[in-house]
Structures are given as structure tokens and as C-alpha cells.
Amino acid sequence: MSEKVSENISSYREEIDRLDSELLSMFNRRANLALKIGRIKKSTGLPVYDPSREKRIFERMKGDNTGPLDNGAVVRLFERVIDESRRLERIMTHPEEPETKGA
């Protein structure tokens, strides 16, 4: 591999590392907001799971998507983000309930 190719790859990887750090920060900010919502839901007796809200998120993200990820990939990514937010809401707002695998 030439030195120029190696430098290009290294430069791209550095940018990916920066983006990964930004994503982590955004995921944690999003999780904190989800926890706040979870506390409100618990105090008002609302369910943690809101399928219509999730559907709106997926539709909005697909509408905002400019690629190169296809819409299926975008939905799968946001499904994971939402699943983890929901799991965190359950753990933090209902610590007495045992977590079940895949919940």
C-alpha cells in the first residue's frame, strides 16, 4: 500500500473516530431525554412503549434520509436506538422489575 493511500485511509479513520465520539455523545443526550420522558410516563401512568411514536420517528427519518444508507438500514439503526432508550427507561423507572432478555 502506498504512503498516499495509507494517509488517506488514516485521515478517513480519524474522521470516523471523531464522528463516533459525537454519536456517543448524542446517544447519551438522547438517553437522558428518554429517561426524563420515562419519569413523566411513570408518574402519569403512561406506558413506556408507544408504537405510534416509533412509527412517526421511522417515517421522519426515512423522509430525511439522503443516503448512502437505504431506508431499511436507517430504520434498523433507529430501532436499536429506540430499543435501548426504552430498555433504559424501564430499568431506571421500574428498578424493581427484573429485566428479561430481549425486552
Image (cartoon, rainbow, N blue to C red):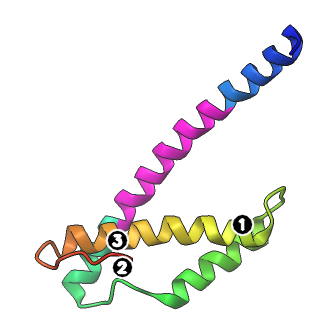
The picture quadrant where one finds residue 34 is bottom left
The amino acid type found where label 1 is placed reads Ala
Of residues 81 and 25, the one nearer the viewer is 81
Q: Is 74 drawn above or below residue 3 in the view shown?
A: below
Distance from label 2 to label 1 (Cα)?
Answer: 21 Å
Marks 2/3 in contact by CB < 8 Å: the verdict is yes
Distance from label 2 to label 3 (Cα)?
Answer: 7 Å
> Residue 15 at what x, y percent from top left?
68, 29
Residue 103 got which mark?
2
Decide whether the magenta segment is chiefly helix, strand or loop: helix
Residue 87 got which mark?
3
**Element class at badge 1:** helix
Residue at the image point whose x is 30% and y is 71% from the top: 89
Residue 80 colored magenta? no
Direction top: furthest residue: 3
Task: Classify the position of the N terminus by image quarter.
Answer: top right
Q: Which numbered disc, 2 or 3, marks the residue closer to the eye?
A: 2
Direction front: furthest residue: 1
Please report whichever mark, 1 or 3, sits nearer to the chain's N-terminal start. 1
Residue at the image point whose x is 83% and y is 58% from the top: 67
Residue 73 got which mark?
1
Q: Is 22 drawn above or below residue 65 in the view shown?
A: above
Marks 1/3 in contact by CB < 8 Å: the verdict is no
The amino acid type found where label 2 is placed reads Ala
The picture quadrant where one finds residue 97 is bottom left
The amino acid type found where label 3 is placed reads Arg
**Element class at badge 3:** helix
**Element class at badge 2:** loop
Distance from label 1 to label 3 (Cα)?
Answer: 21 Å
From which residue to which does the magenta span run?
16-34
Residue at the image point whose x is 45% and y is 87% from the top: 50
> Residue 4 at what x, y percent from top left?
88, 12
